Image: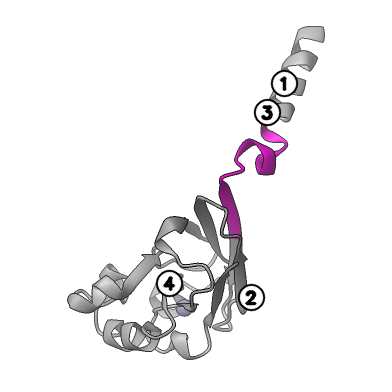
Amino acid sequence: MRKMTALLALVMTSSGFPGVAAADTCELHIEANDQIQFNKSELVVPADCDTIALTLEHTGELPVEVMGHNWTLTRTADWKTVAQAGAGAGLENEYLPQDEKKELIIAYTDMIGGGETTGVTIDVSELEKGGDYTYFCSFPGHWATMNGKLVVE
Ligand code: ZN
């Protein structure tokens, strides 16, 4: 019994302080719902993070075919171009352009349905401190309301 208690304490210690254990990885969490909304209009990343681990949680119930959400990041100058070009690309391509416009995409997650969670890891060295970035959902029509700013400061 004493041995079990000690083991439990060890497990809790090693996983209890993610901010300290993984100081170089900054975690971001954003939710999307069945009302075609993200729960945040801005995400802030400290420039001294090496890596961003972004998690997207779809808190709705509708399936991906009718209420799919993802999280796509581009420079603000490019986001509408990418969103519009991707509308015809199909669910199998996350509704993202497959031609040369694909190079404008900095990062993206899988397209998910209600109750699902996905994520993506971003190398912060690919981002510019003070740069102007916009994230959006690339499901056709969703970008108009599902978008926000990523701030690197
Ligand atoms: Zn969406």
**Residue that badge 1 annotates:** 10
The residue positioned farthest toward the front in the image shown: 129
Marks 3 and 4, the one that precedes in the sequence: 3
Marks 1 and 4, the one that precedes in the sequence: 1
The residues tagged by marks 3 and 4 sit, at their Cα atoms, a distance apart of 32 Å
The residues tagged by marks 1 and 3 sit, at their Cα atoms, a distance apart of 6 Å
**Residue that badge 3 annotates:** 14
Question: Few, some or many C-alpha atoms within 10 Å of disc 2 (few <14, some 14-19, many ≥20)?
Answer: some
Measuring from the top left, give residue 41's x and y in whole percent.
61, 79
Question: Judging from the image, what secondary structure is the residue with disc 2 in?
Answer: loop
Foreground of the two, 118 or 122: 122
Question: Judging from the image, what secondary structure is the residue with disc 1 in?
Answer: helix
Q: Which residues are magenta?
A: 15-28
When asked about the image quadrant of residue 16, the answer is: top right
The residues tagged by marks 1 and 4 sit, at their Cα atoms, a distance apart of 38 Å
Which residue is at 39% across, 63% downward?
Answer: 110
Question: Judging from the image, what secondary structure is the residue with disc 3 in?
Answer: helix
In the displayed structure, 10 sits above or below 47; it is above
Q: Is residue 139 left or right of residue 54?
A: left
Measuring from the top left, give residue 67's x and y in whole percent.
46, 78
Q: What is the three-letter code of the residue carrying label 3?
A: Ser
**Residue that badge 2 annotates:** 40
| Location of the C terminus (image quadrant) | bottom right
Measuring from the top left, give residue 109's x and y in whole percent.
41, 63
Measuring from the top left, give residue 57's x and y in whole percent.
56, 63
In magenta stretch: residue 34: no
**Residue that badge 4 annotates:** 73
Q: Which mark's residue is nearer the viewer, 1 or 4?
A: 4
Question: Few, some or many C-alpha atoms within 10 Å of disc 1 (few <14, some 14-19, many ≥20)?
Answer: few
Which residue is at 67% across, 28% downward?
Answer: 14
Question: Few, some or many C-alpha atoms within 10 Å of disc 3 (few <14, some 14-19, many ≥20)?
Answer: few
Q: What is the count of numbered marks?
A: 4
